Image (tube, rainbow, N blue to C red):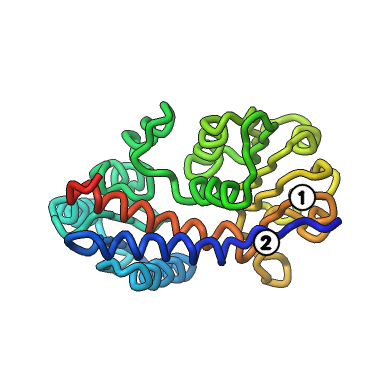
Amino acid sequence: MAATIIDGKALAAKVKDGVRQEAAQLPRKPGLAVVLVGDDPASRVYVNGKKRDCQECGFYSEEYALPAQTTQRQLLELVAELNGRQDIDGILVQLPLPRGLDEREVLLAIHPDKDVDCFHPFNVGRLTIGDPVFQPCTPGGVMEMLKEYHIDPAGKRCVVLGRSNIVGKPMALLLLHAHGTVTVCHSKTPDMAALASSADILVSAVGKTGLVTANMVKEGAVVIDVAMNRNEAGKLCGDVCYAEAAEKASYITPVPGGVGPMTRAMLMKNTLTAAKLHQGMD
């Protein structure tokens, strides 16, 4: 029996509709500032998508498109200015930054209550102890998908492929907080295939086309493909060999149309949370 497809696009629309309704009840619109340095084409696509999301949710948004030659000091001065703005609830600096700029210093400069990406050590620490203000957008989106499809991680074997600070580590934490038994695999893990094939819930966030083959998928497993790659033909794909994995999985996310739309929807949800905090509504 073929797997049920987890429709991230439909769920993202549902989440954003809920955000829009809540935002309409606030004394003022939630405000999001997006900072883009340089002219990376993929980053431009993401930023344009976020602007559309803000419009759909009834948010106020500002974009700062800075030249690649922007200095560290100029970027930090802009972040400091946005930190002080009462009409801006969330600050998003689009990564990666051009060479020569210190991403870590820039992310540290964003005030934790405006850190809607959940990258600041303060927010990462709160996530670690199970008391988050914001959920990291991609892992948070995955948890929303599991909830929507009534997939409870409690008591299940969860395997996360990838240990990045943006996806792998926080994904493992969220599954752990949901009472899953979590294993994290990475480039130094011996026999990753055997561990993956033991998973009731398998999340792949490596960024390697064709990484997850059918022999790595347990019969009836839930397969979440976080990666966004391009194959040799230039077509968007994830880490998972979709057609063969779908024959064994009970649920599976497509690429595109799976986790990607949910990442952006969770950014809107986090910005709403920040706005409610700033307006004394939470």
Q: Name the residue carrying label 2.
A: 254
- Along the line of sight, which residue is nearer the eye, 112 or 79? 112
Q: Secondary structure at mark 2?
A: loop
Relative horizontal placement of residue 245, taking residue 148 as reference (left or right): right
Q: Residue at x 55, y 33 (%)?
A: 178
| Residue 161 percent across, percent down from the top left | 65, 40
User: Which image quadrant for residue 162?
Assistant: top right
Q: Nearer the viewer, mark 1 or mark 2?
A: 1
Q: Residue at x 39, y 35 (%)?
A: 124
Disc ID at residue 151: none
Answer yes or no: is residue 41 visible. Answer: yes
- For the C terminus, the image quarter is top left
Disc 2 marks which amino acid?
Answer: Pro
Alpha carbon distance from label 1 to label 2 = 13 Å
Q: Name the residue carrying label 1.
A: 250
- For the N terminus, the image quarter is bottom right
Relative horizontal placement of residue 93, taking residue 163 as reference (left or right): left
Q: Secondary structure at mark 1?
A: loop
